[in-house]
């Protein structure tokens, strides 16, 4: 089980530790600055991506020496004249997700405006995945989150083969590479988008995948919280079927997959696209244990009166045991469960709006 | 030589004292700064070398006009101030 948690917020990065059965804030870093992504690597280094309003995206790293230092930020290459009609900027907008690459030293960074970056030295330096960035269809990707830029928010590395990768893009569906990023293909079939005209509703590239999560022990099982509902794939993200039993609503951003049980996953629903608050002002977590055939609505310890918390796509996490979950909200609420979501407690802290919640490796 | 000064807001992230540099354009003057202090570049310019959207540069009290090419003329004794723009919040 993981006894440590990292929480990236609009105004700093917070570290929590479990002590004597309680979770306590034990560290506060970058106070006042937006943190857009965080990752503790297998060797104990902690990476924090900042999204500075004036000065752009930055990346800081705390190694074993326990001192923070700024490291190289992913950077886009000079834009050639041939790209004059590219609808997306060739400049880093924000680091949206950081993931371990399954090989010593390898990390992936998903960004806005849709560049995927790779590090082979534990985050000290980064190189753009050229194959994905130069792919002609990348220009069809659509912007999200109130901006004009598309973003890579999910990077799934197959635990059996680190060269086998899936990425989730808002908005451009699910892309796969079987050769560590040398080539890519759009793979998702079976999703549907109500925000598109009828003739394009099932177009794979038009699917606004909000977040992907896969079962570590059965990597072919992938869950998706989509703009228009919840979907599940049993073949690594190629074919999807909608999970219509989700309750109390089908809209949301976050999803967590159980690390060993392919039938168990968690979601945090909101009313709908144009009303992003919990149904009836009651914050709940939806859990399925039967592959999406049915859901339990979990609410013990969560606010049930006038709660207007929204949970962003990176703000729900599960540890390696599958028992501990944590999520944070746009209202700064942070809840932790040690019983698979049956009950939740709130650490003593009043945090800024939360973008990312991540357990340290077990 | 022209003098380039940086907003105190940058001091939270890195040291950025005023510096006197040679250059006939804003691009040349800033390039001279970044040659000595490469870690400053990404705070002021985007990946394509334009001024960041929420950074503003004043030349002798007037905002720089060419935010992409940085072709504004710079002369000896000029004062260049790099600030965060109010548009960034």
Image (tube, coloured by chain):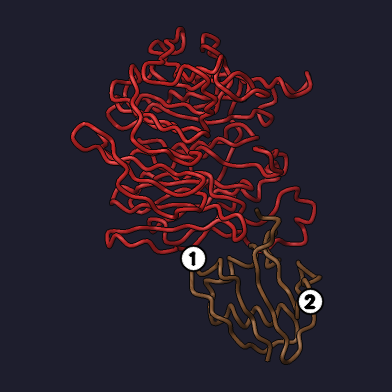
Where B7 falls versus A2 (above or below)? below
* Colour of chain B in the rendered structure image: brown
Among the 4 quarters of the image, the one containing residue A151: top right
Nearest the viewer among A310 and A212 is: A310
x 68%, y 39%: residue: A146
Q: Earlier in the sequence, mark 2 or mark 1?
A: 1
Give me the chain letter of mark 2: B
Nearest the viewer among A185 and A115 is: A115
Q: Which chain is red?
A: A
Q: Which residue is mark 1?
A: B13
Give me the chain letter of mark 1: B
Q: Is residue A191 left or right of residue A70?
A: right
- The x and y percentages for residue A92 are 61, 55
Q: How many residues crowd around disc 2 within 10 Å: few (fewer than 14), some, or many (20 or more)? A: some
- The x and y percentages for residue A187 are 58, 30
Nearest the viewer among A40 and B6 is: B6
Tell me the SS state at disc 2. Answer: loop
Rounded to the nearest angstrom, the CA distance separating label 2 from label 1 is 28 Å
Q: Which residue is mark 2?
A: B71
Among the 4 quarters of the image, the one containing residue A258: top left
- The x and y percentages for residue A321 are 27, 28
x 49%, y 58%: residue: A126
Position of the N terminus of chain A, as image quadrant, is top left
- The x and y percentages for residue A132 are 60, 46
Q: Is residue A285 left or right of residue A252?
A: left
């Amino acid at each position: 089980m993981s006894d440590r948690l990292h929480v990236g917020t609009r105004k700093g990065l917070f570290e929590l530790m479990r002590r004597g059965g309680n979770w306590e804030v034990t560290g506060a870093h970058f106070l006042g600055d937006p943190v857009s992504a965080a990752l503790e690597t297998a060797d104990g280094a902690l990476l924090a991506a900042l999204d500075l309003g004036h000065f752009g995206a930055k990346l800081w790293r705390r190694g074993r020496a326990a001192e923070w230092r700024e490291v190289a930020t992913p950077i886009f290459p000079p834009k050639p004249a041939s790209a004059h009609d590219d609808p997306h900027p060739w400049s880093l907008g924000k680091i949206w997700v950081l993931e371990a690459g399954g090989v010593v030293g390898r990390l992936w960074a998903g960004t806005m405006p849709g560049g995927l970056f790779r590090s082979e030295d534990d985050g000290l330096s980064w190189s753009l995945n050229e194959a994905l960035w130069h792919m002609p269809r990348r220009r069809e990707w659509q912007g999200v989150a109130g901006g004009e830029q598309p973003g890579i928010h999910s990077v799934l590395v197959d635990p059996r083969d680190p060269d086998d990768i899936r990425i989730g893009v808002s908005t451009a569906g699910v892309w796969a590479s079987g050769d560590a990023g040398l080539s890519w293909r759009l793979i998702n079939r079976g999703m549907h988008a109500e925000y598109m005209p009828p003739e394009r509703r099932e177009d794979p590239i038009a699917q606004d995948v909000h977040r992907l999560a896969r079962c570590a022990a059965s990597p072919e099982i992938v869950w998706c919280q989509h703009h228009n509902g919840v979907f599940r794939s049993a073949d690594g993200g190629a074919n999807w079927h909608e999970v219509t039993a989700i309750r109390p609503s089908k809209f949301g951003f976050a999803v967590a997959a159980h690390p060993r049980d392919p039938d168990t996953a968690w979601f945090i629903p909101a009313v709908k696209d144009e009303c992003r608050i919990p149904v009836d002002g009651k914050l709940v977590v939806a859990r399925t244990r039967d592959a999406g055939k049915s859901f339990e609505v979990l609410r013990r310890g969560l606010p049930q009166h006038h709660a207007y918390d929204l949970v962003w796509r990176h703000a729900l996490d599960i540890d390696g045991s599958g028992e501990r979950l944590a999520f944070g909200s746009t209202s700064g609420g942070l809840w932790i469960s040690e019983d698979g979501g049956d009950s939740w407690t709130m650490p003593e802290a009043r945090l800024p709006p939360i973008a990312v919640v991540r357990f340290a490796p077990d | 030589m022209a003098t380039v000064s940086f907003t105190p807001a940058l001091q939270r992230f890195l040291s950025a004292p005023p510096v006197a540099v040679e250059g006939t354009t804003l691009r040349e003057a800033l390039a001279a700064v970044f040659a000595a202090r490469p870690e400053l570049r990404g705070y002021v310019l985007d990946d394509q070398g334009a001024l960041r959207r929420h950074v503003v540069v004043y030349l002798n009290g007037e905002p720089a006009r060419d935010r992409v090419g940085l072709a504004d003329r710079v002369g000896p004794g000029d004062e260049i101030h790099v600030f965060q723009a109010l548009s960034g919040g």
